[in-house]
Amino acid sequence: MVSTAKRTLEMQLLLGPDETVPVAGRFSYRSDRPYEVEVVFISRGETVATWLFARDLLLGGLCGEAGEGDVRVWPAGRPGGPRRVHIELTTDDSICELSVRASELTAWLEQTAAIVPPGHEARYLDIDAHLARLLAGKC
């Protein structure tokens, strides 16, 4: 049986030092895909992008810089304000930086850890099923 953790988190798209746009991030995690997180970004009721990346990036980004290349994650916050986590997404055409409350992201990551403890992902991965899907062209 597949277990899931889903939560929509309010995020801020950072446009400049003092300019942001609210964006909802629908975070999804599945026990049958234990290494990955899917985030669907929604603005004004429309899906604007969907990204898949490693759960380890979010876990590492709670305490320090994590990631290279397309996805980078790091903690941030202003003095006296709530701790936040920044997520930078890079494509060939652009760079997008988002911010989410660290407490909300941490709560969701705790849900994922209850499903598949970090470091134990290989026990939950059915490599034969993934290989069959890959060979059938259904990834």
Image (cartoon, rainbow, N blue to C red):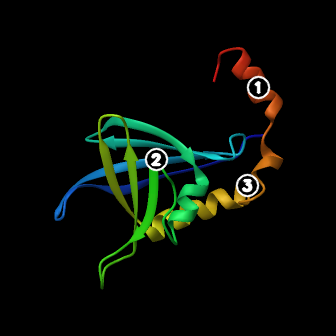
What amino acid is at disc 1?
Answer: Leu
For image coordinates 70% across by 21% down, the residue present is: 134
Quote the CA–CA distance across marks 3 and 1. Answer: 21 Å
What amino acid is at disc 2?
Answer: Gly
Could you tell which of marks 3 and 1 lies nearer the N-terminus?
Answer: 3
Image side of residue 127 versus residue 81, left or right: right
Q: Is residue 115 above or below residue 124?
A: below
**Foreground residue, 90 or 106?**
90
Instruction: Characterize the local packing of mark 2: few (<14), some (14-19) or many (20 or more) Cα atoms within 10 angstroms.
Output: few
Badge 3 is on which residue? 116
Q: Is residue 131 above or below residue 66?
A: above
Quote the CA–CA distance across marks 1 and 2. Answer: 26 Å
What amino acid is at disc 3?
Answer: Val
For image coordinates 71% across by 45% down, the residue present is: 31
Q: x%, y% of residue 130?
A: 74, 29
Badge 2 is on which residue? 69
Q: In the rendered image, which quarter contains the N terminus?
A: top right
**Hey, which quadrant is residue 46 in on the image?**
top left
Q: Is residue 109 above or below residue 23?
A: below
**Foreground residue, 52 or 42?**
52
Quote the CA–CA distance across marks 2 and 3. Answer: 26 Å
Q: x%, y% of residue 62?
A: 51, 68
Q: Dot 1: what SS? A: helix
For image coordinates 68% across by 41% down, the residue present is: 33
**Hey, which quadrant is residue 84 in on the image?**
bottom left
Q: x%, y% of residue 116?
A: 73, 55
Image side of residue 9 versus residue 22, left or right: right
Instruction: Characterize the local packing of mark 3: few (<14), some (14-19) or many (20 or more) Cα atoms within 10 angstroms.
Output: many
Could you tell which of marks 2 and 3 lies nearer the N-terminus?
Answer: 2
Badge 1 is on which residue? 131
Q: Dot 2: what SS? A: loop
